[in-house]
Amino acid sequence: MNGVNGERVDDLVKMFNESTDKYKVVAVNKGNYDEVINGTIAAYRAKRPPHIVQIYERGFMTMLLSDAVVPVQELMDKSEVKIDWSDFIKPVAGFYSYKGKLAAMPFNSSSPILYYNKDQFQKAGFDKPAETWGEFEKQLYAIKKAGAAECGTALATDYHWSMIENYSAINDLPYATKSNGYDGLDTEFVYNKTLVVPQVARMKKWLDDGVLQIAGQGFSPEQLFTSGKCATYFASTAAHSGIERNAKIGWSATFMPWEEGKQPKNSTIGGAALWVIKGHKADEQQAIVAFFDFLAKPETQLWWHKATGYVPLTNKAYELAKAEGYYKQSPTREIAVLQLNRGTPTANSLGFHFGNFTQSMFAQREEVEAVFTGSKNAQQAMDDATKRGNEILRQYERLNKGKY
């Protein structure tokens, strides 16, 4: 992690180190998520692994079946430190669990929400974004027509997460068979047979009509929003810290839209968890236990939530925030928590457990970008994306047969 949230990680480590004279954590930045997971595999093979590594949610299956990790609940339950695992927010705990037990320690968990420019919406005659995609689309066109904003929405670089994956979860659409991979490695992508296809076509239409803008020429998607060029921005709740620091506009945030006639389900998480790597001495594992115990405390979780915008990981921390009146002061910080906890997770909304998920995601992005450039239509592109993704899944299944 870099930027504002990277600074907060350093603060967190300093807080722990100052709380004990027995252990010391050293935080080392090893690049972005893809670089970290590749570096971890290399370090483990070289027998020089870190004690703890922060791996993004897409790396869950890679880490789980790597034979390089100590499951976190197994480690903690063997110690004298007791953590109430049932208190962790269900979509977070469910995502990082295997056979009913947490495999990794949830750390920076997020969910996408919709940020919007209040002044630009009001100029076009709206109080806030509509709840459904169809009505929200009408608003974006009206905002552009009224000259309130140059574009309706800025496209984030990780748009697949909000616009396709969470779109599927919230609308209770199957993304893949076998409960999105939870029930077996023989899962297959099926999002080419759902409303994802018209959703991709909608994004293409917005792009052609100048309602959607892709970042470039020195602007990040967040800057397109914070500068006032675009009226909305679908991004992680963790974007709060950067938006608060850089925005020159009056802004707010709300829930992700859903399709007309649907009963919206919970969104799914992004972010990362902390994995314990094998090969360390017993006293060093006790240091890991002490650090994780510190991270799980409601007071630590509340500080992290406030400092970064990531969601509090336990119900006790969430209740502590409410008791303090935090959400009366900062109501947009509660949106992701409420959205994650909305209803009971279904097989379509619990999350995604796919081997080599990063590779299939890149294939999907290439196919969506083929739609953007006009070389494929949405159906053809999603058919090709699922075909390529399923080839990646079959390769992973062959390499890990009998492990899951």
Image (spheres, helix red, strand yellow):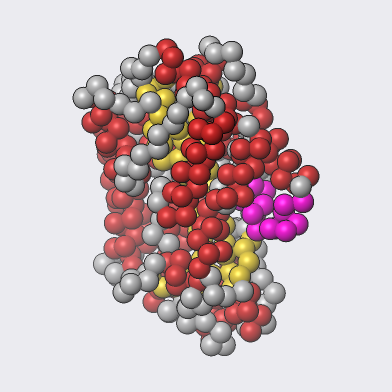
Expressed as whole percent of the image width and height from the top left, the position of residue 295 reads 56, 33
- Is residue 286 placed above or below 127 in the rendered structure? above
Residue located at (53% from left, 53% from top): 238
Residue located at (33% from left, 22% from top): 68
Tell me, yes or no, whether the highlighted magenta stretch contains residue 338: yes
Q: How many marks?
A: 0
Expressed as whole percent of the image width and height from the top left, the position of residue 336 reads 61, 51
Q: Is 185 situated left or right of 95 in this image?
A: left
Expressed as whole percent of the image width and height from the top left, the position of residue 153 reads 49, 71
Does the image show residue 104?
yes
Tell me, yes or no, whether the highlighted magenta stretch contains residue 371: no
Q: Nearer the viewer, residue 197 or 326?
A: 326
Q: Is 133 situated left or right of 203 in this image?
A: right
Q: Quadrant of residue 262?
A: bottom right
Q: Is 389 situated left or right of 143 in this image?
A: left
- Is residue 23 placed above or below 225 in the rendered structure? above
Does the image show residue 173?
no
Residue located at (50% from left, 39% from top): 14
Magenta-drawn segment: 325-340
Q: Nearer the viewer, residue 183 or 156?
A: 156
- Is residue 78 placed above or below 128 in the rendered structure? above
Q: Quadrant of residue 131?
A: bottom right
Q: Residue furthest front?
A: 21
Q: Nearer the viewer, residue 287 or 235?
A: 287
Expressed as whole percent of the image width and height from the top left, the position of residue 98 reads 49, 24
Q: Is 255 situated left or right of 281 in this image?
A: right
Q: Quadrant of the C terminus?
A: top left
Main SS of the magenta part reads: helix
